[in-house]
Image (cartoon, grey):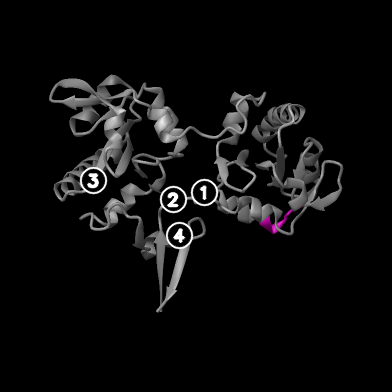
């Protein structure tokens, strides 16, 4: 039989193969309609992978912004290129899309488009993924960064590192009825930092919060070396204070800009979420901490760097490094 063992040191590896999927032996279409080698056209450049379609008004509106950003980058001599991955329903729509775009395109219905959508977990369009010249993902939030910086002043739009976000500013800590502060440097003293994203308005969070709290208490009693930071998604002070009552760890308030930055950085789309990182480096161990706690309530495998992949969790093997061992 075969057992599947997954390394979860990163939910999406730093080298995701995105550029390789586009460049390796692939032909792309220029704005003028010429067919050229993607490898030579993209070599040494930051690459924006654009998912868009002519039938979508939001896509058409975003493309106007992106054209401005693209022209600004080219005028400034930046090594940047964009590759259009069409979501159009027919070739007429594809050509309509291309007519607005001064950059490269994959051919209509190229099978690599589907592969790239799965690789980058694209659910909605428009979507823009930026890769560095080595093919590493710089940001999945390309649409947001282009809207915020159409002139390209912050290009290549690399997201801030964890400790650049937290810096040495204080986080809140509730002891009894008193809110005190704790320096962010305290969070770096352990091997693992657990970032817990939750909110008082979230019914699921209300059920999961006690489970997470009990699990962390049990892990600490067993000598596990970790810190926890609650990243609030609350809507007001009352929710935030109520949340803190069940938590014995520091927190970032809902109105702390760092909470929003971390929510974006780790692509938190649903609450509750638990992200585990190496405290010293900020490297991601897992973004699926809640599920891991449910599967390993005793915490025997904490911090779950390598674990056997259960049948229930096997639907993401296309997105993470996977080793199949034949026994």
The image quadrant where one finds the N terminus is: bottom left
Q: Nearer the viewer, residue 319 or 80?
A: 80
Residue 124 lies, with reference to residue 63, above or below; the image says: below
Span of residues in magenta? 107-112
Q: Residue at x 51, y 49 (%)?
A: 14
The residue tagged 4 is 315
What's the distance in space between the residues labelled 2 and 1, CA to CA?
8 Å
Please say if the residues under marks 2 and 1 sit with CB atoms less than 8 Å apart: yes
| Residue 249, x across and y down, in percent | 22, 33
95 and 171: which is toward the camera: 171
Who comes first in sequence, dot 2 or dot 4? 2
The numbered mark at residue 225 is 3
Q: Residue at x 77, y 47 (%)?
A: 41
SS type, badge 1: loop
Quarter in which the C terminus is drawn: bottom left
Q: In the image shown, does 194 or 239 lie closer to the viewer? A: 194
- Image location of residue 62, percent across then percent down: 67, 31
Q: Is residue 109 magenta?
A: yes
* Front position among marks 2 and 4: 2
Q: Residues within 10 Å of mark 4 (few under 14, many from 20)?
A: few
Q: CA distance from mark 4 to mark 3?
A: 30 Å
- The residue that label 2 is drawn on is 10
**First along the sequence among labels 4 and 3:** 3
Label 3: few (<14), some (14–19) or many (≥20) C-alpha neighbours in 10 Å: some
Disc 1: which residue: 14
Mark 1 Cα within 10 Å, few/some/many (few <14, many 20+)? few
Could you tell which of marks 3 and 1 lies nearer the N-terminus?
A: 1
Q: Is residue 169 above or below residue 198?
A: above
Main secondary structure along the magenta-highlighted residues: loop
Asked whether residue 136 is drawn in magenta, I would say no
User: How many numbered marks does the figure carry?
Assistant: 4
């Amino acid at each position: 039989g075969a057992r599947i063992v997954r390394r979860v040191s990163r939910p999406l590896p730093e080298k995701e193969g995105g550029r390789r999927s586009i460049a390796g032996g692939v032909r792309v279409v220029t704005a003028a309609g010429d067919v050229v080698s993607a490898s030579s056209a993209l070599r040494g450049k930051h690459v924006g992978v654009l998912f868009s379609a002519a039938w979508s008004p939001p896509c058409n509106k975003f493309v106007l912004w992106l054209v401005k950003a693209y022209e600004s980058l080219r005028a400034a001599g930046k090594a940047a290129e964009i590759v259009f991955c069409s979501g159009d329903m027919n070739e007429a729509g594809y050509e309509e899309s291309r007519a607005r775009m001064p950059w490269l395109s994959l051919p209509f219905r190229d099978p690599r488009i589907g592969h790239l959508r799965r690789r980058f977990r694209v659910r909605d369009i428009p979507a823009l993924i930026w890769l560095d010249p080595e093919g590493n993902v710089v940001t999945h939030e390309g649409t947001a960064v282009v809207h915020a910086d159409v002139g390209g002043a912050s290009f290549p739009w690399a997201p801030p590192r964890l400790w650049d976000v937290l810096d040495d500013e204080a986080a809140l800590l509730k002891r009894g009825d008193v809110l005190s502060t704790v320096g962010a440097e305290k969070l770096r003293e352990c091997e693992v930092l657990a970032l817990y994203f939750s909110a008082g308005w979230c019914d699921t969070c209300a059920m999961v919060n006690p489970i997470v709290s009990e699990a962390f208490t049990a892990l600490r009693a067993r000598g596990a070396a970790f810190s926890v930071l609650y990243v609030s998604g609350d809507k007001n002070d009352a929710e935030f204070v109520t949340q803190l009552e069940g938590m014995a760890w520091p927190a970032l308030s809902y109105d702390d800009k760092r909470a929003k930055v971390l929510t974006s950085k780790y692509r938190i789309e649903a609450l509750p979420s638990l992200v585990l990182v190496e405290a010293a480096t900020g490297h991601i161990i897992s973004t699926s901490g809640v599920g891991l706690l449910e599967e390993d309530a005793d915490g025997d495998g904490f911090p779950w760097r390598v674990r056997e992949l259960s049948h229930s969790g096997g639907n993401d093997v296309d997105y993470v490094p996977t080793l199949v061992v034949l026994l």
